[in-house]
Image (cartoon, rainbow, N blue to C red):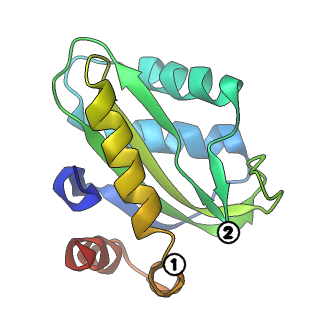
């Protein structure tokens, strides 16, 4: 599954002002909560924090792909946020992160989850794409960029 298929304009946010890993994860969950049905924002946060305990989802180059699995849902949801200032996210290259692509998938969709993570990582391995994402100054432009990329 491609990012463009599961990202909505309501889950795309540019230049967010946050100062910590916990705050960005909370913001991600706040946006996602409106799209996942009966799952509470705190449960979304728990799923991301549980995954982060296994190791940071900061993949390097200022990018993180926090992700979690959700019970009792059959719909994947993505959130894309860029931050005003890069924050410490314990990334593998020790660089601060300013691009967050979060993914929530049904817990019984393991292969789909892996395929979606792979397609996101591939999309954001393109330096030109990363530069364009960082240049976006409004939510709609950021959303449109992702839609055009796929």
Q: Position of residue 78 (x, y in %)?
A: 32, 47
**In the rendered view, would you say 141 is above or below 23?**
below
Quadrant of the rendered image containing residue 29: top left
Residue 124 visible here? yes
Bin the neighbour count of mark 1 within 10 Å (Cα to Cα): few under 14, some 14-19, many 20 and up.
some
> Count the marks: how many?
2
Residue 33 in view (yes/no)? no
User: Which residue is situated farthest in the right direction here?
Assistant: 94
Q: Is mark 2 on a helix, strand or loop?
A: loop
**Sequence-wise first label, 2 or 1:** 2
Height in image: 52 above or below 27? above
Q: Residue 141 carries which label?
A: none
**Residue drawn at 21 percent across, 79 percent down:** 148
Residue 128 position in % (x across, y down): 48, 87
Q: What element carries label 1?
A: helix
**How far is mark 2 from mark 1, CA to CA?**
9 Å
Q: Do the residues labelled 2 and 1 touch (CB within 8 Å)?
A: yes
Q: Position of residue 142 (x, y in %)?
A: 35, 75
Q: Which residue is drawn at 37% across and 38% down?
A: 114
Q: Looking at the image, which residue is at 26% across and 17% down?
A: 108
Q: How crowded is mark 2: few (under 14 residues within 10 Å), some or many (20 or more)?
A: some
Q: Please give left or right for residue 115 compared with residue 55 in the image.
A: left
Instruction: List the residue tagged with mark 2.
Output: 61
Decide if residue 139 is on the left or right side of residue 27.
Answer: left
Q: Mark 1 points at which residue?
A: 130
């Amino acid at each position: 599954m491609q990012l463009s298929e599961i990202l909505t304009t309501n889950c795309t946010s540019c230049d967010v002002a946050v100062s910590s890993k916990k705050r960005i994860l909370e913001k991600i969950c706040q946006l996602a909560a409106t799209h996942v049905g009966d799952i509470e924002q705190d449960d979304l946060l728990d799923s991301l924090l549980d995954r982060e305990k296994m190791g940071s989802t900061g993949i390097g180059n200022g990018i993180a792909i926090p992700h979690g699995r959700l019970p009792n849902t059959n719909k994947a949801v993505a959130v894309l946020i860029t931050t005003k200032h890069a924050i410490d996210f314990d990334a593998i290259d020790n660089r601060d992160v300013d691009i967050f692509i979060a993914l929530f998938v049904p817990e019984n969709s393991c292969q789909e989850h892996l395929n979606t993570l792979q397609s996101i990582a591939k999309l954001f391995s393109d330096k030109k794409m990363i530069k364009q994402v960082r240049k976006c100054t409004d939510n709609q432009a950021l959303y449109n960029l992702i839609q055009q990329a796929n």
